[in-house]
Image: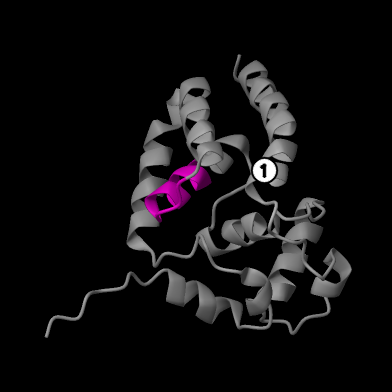
Amino acid sequence: MKKVRVQFLLFVYDKTQKLYRKYFKKKKRQWQFNEEQLLKFQEDSLGRKLGEFYKKHGFSMIPKMENHDVHHLITGCGTQFEDEIAMQYLLLGNGKLNAHLLAAVVLGTFILPEYMKLYMKAYRKGQSMRPFYHWDFESLLWQNFDHLKDYIQQKETPVLY
């Protein structure tokens, strides 16, 4: 039964992803790098880690959606469908809010409710991280991946004077 539910979600994702890129990402341009070029970045860089991610999973870059793949690396969220929904919860907890994200959260929760504990854990994790959902990661591809990840995972604390 889960297989049928996931197939339905994949069908919906396939149909809505192009619309999302067209209407929500119209001002965004695709990155200037491809998967092979990313593998030529310095070994400990975000760019190299992203290239290795694509190679390991057999994925190719989707224009205007490259930051999404960086979110997988930064957050440690997997690529199974329940992990994709959990990542949307994490981004919601991190402050991101748009119609596509809310639709993914609502539909994903309705279709795969057995992962609610995973979703809530991801939401709380997103709240505990520095806001990163709006960052342009293309400009950070040269940065040390571990340092960047550590920085994001440290919640900002207000300074009281």
Q: Residue at x 75, y 39 (%)?
A: 18
Which image quarter: residue 81? top right
Q: Is residue 112 magenta?
A: no
How many numbered markers are drawn?
Answer: 1
Query: Most prominent secondary structure in the magenta stretch?
Result: helix
Q: Amino acid at mark 1?
A: Tyr
Quarter of the image for the C terminus: give it: bottom left
Q: Residue at x 74, y 85 (%)?
A: 42
Give whichever of 64, 68 is nearer the camera: 64
Residue furthest to the top: 1
Quarter of the image for the N terminus: give it: top right
Which image quarter: residue 94? bottom left
Relative to 46, does residue 114 appear above or below in the rendering?
A: above
Q: Is residue 95 magenta?
A: yes
Q: Secondary structure at mark 1?
A: helix
What residue is pinned by disc 1?
23
Give whichever of 150, 93 is nearer the camera: 93
Where does the magenta region start and end? 86-97
